[in-house]
Image (spheres, coloured by chain):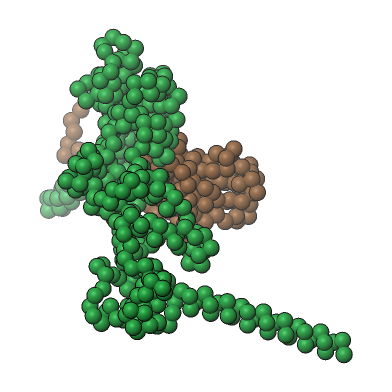
Chain colours: A brown, B green
Amino acid sequence: MKINRRKFLNSILGIGGIGGILSIFYPIVSYLIPPKMAEPKVNSVKAGSTSDFAANSYKIVKFGRKPVILIKTVDNQYKALSASCTHLDCIVQYKSDTKQIWCACHNGIYDLNGRNISGPPPRPLEQYDVKIVKDEIVITKMG
Amino acid sequence: MRTRVFYLSTTVLLTIFLFGFAFQKTDNKTKQTPKVDNCLSCHKDIDDMPQGYSDYDVHRQAGLTCASCHGGDPSSTDQEAAMSPAKGYAGVPKRKDIPKFCGKCHSNIDYMRIYQPRIATDQVTQYYTSMHGKKLMAGDENVAECASCHTAHSIFPVKDPRATVYKLNIPSTCNKCHGNSELMKKYNLPSNQLEEYSKSVHGIALLKQNDLGAPACNDCHGNHGAMPPGITSISHVCGMCHSSNMEYFNATKMAKAFAEQDFHGCEQCHGNHGVQKPTDDMVGVGKNSKCVDCHDKGDVGYVAAEKIEAEIVQLKNNYDAATNKFLEVREKGMNDVDIGFLLQDAKQNLIQSRTLVHTFDPAKVVVKTKDGMNITNKAIMLSDKEISEYYTRRNGFAAATLAFLVIVIALYLKIKDKEKRKQA
């Protein structure tokens, strides 16, 4: 089949046009369905419903790039503290038997206010505010 | 009438109570802080002040005077009368008497409660159980007494950075005597402890990074009751902070074997003042291994050491590879948050597997290293996905640019073509 100059140009224009339209619409569609990306700066996070959280238990919540330990004490109080041990950055846990925060790496112990009371941790854990908004737990930065 | 008597008696009682209270207070005050302190004014006038005297000394700031410690009558302007033994003048105490001299107040709970309700009052008792105290009691006046560490006239609270016993200052305070090789030779003690300590993991943390959580001399040796830790107490001393390590070690057969051989627990492998951050090759069978000091090729300990090191090194290498990938993801501006959390978990497994070395049981170490390997592999997988996404986006951008370029060229040629046909 003989392709003349006009046909060739029209084909190129067609292909380029389709490519151009795709190049415009792909970012628009991608914007509408954004990739999984953490917010660059987080000031508060929702940590689930109060009814799903048993007393004398804990969970680790992602607060931007930082892990936060959220504890519901035996008397139904909420405590949120940085979950990174101040010794070597291990993730701390809540010990429901001793009612203390414990780091499994070197047996560092903190009280429920985050004060380092035993073992190698040199500093207390950073505290976060906990608010209950319509049965939902919201952790915010202090101050 | 009855009401009048009631009011009168209440007023009288209240007056007596208030006067009594006021007199008691005044009495205490005059006893401790006389309005006139002729000792200080005269000694200042004749420029004969004690060495290192500071007006900011904790005792001075609390309102105590020279006479509070040295006795005498500060209200008298007559030297003889002011410094008369009849007025309780004790003068400068002899070195051997200094602990008791300070103890007059510091061992008196009722007195100390007025100024420092939380302060311990057993320092002198503790001191006499220390090596310093025992030697001083035996007549050796070269050893440290209260003023050697606290100074005599520039004493500050322990949390005051000006204090010679402030945490950051303790190593140099102890070194005043313990760094004196001539003096230490008499006791057959080394004098390079500060030099060793400064290069140790604890010394770097305290002296270079100002980390007040790091131990100074007194955290291991005690302060008023200072003693070298004995063989049986070494793992307890280290275990005050490194409690998991102590717990694991004490539960092993090695702890018993160490005790039988008179080995010094933690110190045997880690050293004392110069303790360094442990490296992975301290276990295993390489040239830096501590295990081969006692274990020979083929024995159970040798095999266990080899296995433990191999496991930890494998996890460490995988963790490093995952960290490099994580850094690449971050550099490319892709989503690194979940990878960061995975790496934190992996690091935790690595640290715990290193701590589990003190069980000397490869099976226990493997449990942690296996978890760590799974997590690091997951982190590597996620990183690869993000890196691949980055290239997909970049290639997509190149394709889009190419498409637009083609359109522009094609449009140009098309316009040219149309113009040519118009002219024709």
Residue B71 image position (x, y, % from top left): 39, 71
Rendered image quadrant of residue B399:
top left
The residue that appears at 33% across and 29% down in the rendered structure is B264
Residue in the foreground of this view, choosing between A101 and B343: A101
**Residue located farthest toward the right when viewing the structure as drawn:** B1
Residue in the foreground of this view, choosing between B104 and B206: B104
Residue B321 in sight? no
The residue that appears at 43% across and 58% down in the rendered structure is B103
Q: Is residue A118 above or below residue B173?
A: above
**Residue located farthest toward the top when viewing the structure as drawn:** B298
Residue A26 image position (x, y, % from top left): 35, 44
Tell me the quadrant of the picture where the N terminus of chain B can be found. bottom right
The residue that appears at 46% across and 52% down in the rendered structure is B122
Residue B293 image position (x, y, % from top left): 25, 20
The residue that appears at 68% across and 84% down in the rendered structure is B15
On screen, residue A135 versus residue B186, left or right, reads right
Residue in the foreground of this view, choosing between A56 and B236: B236
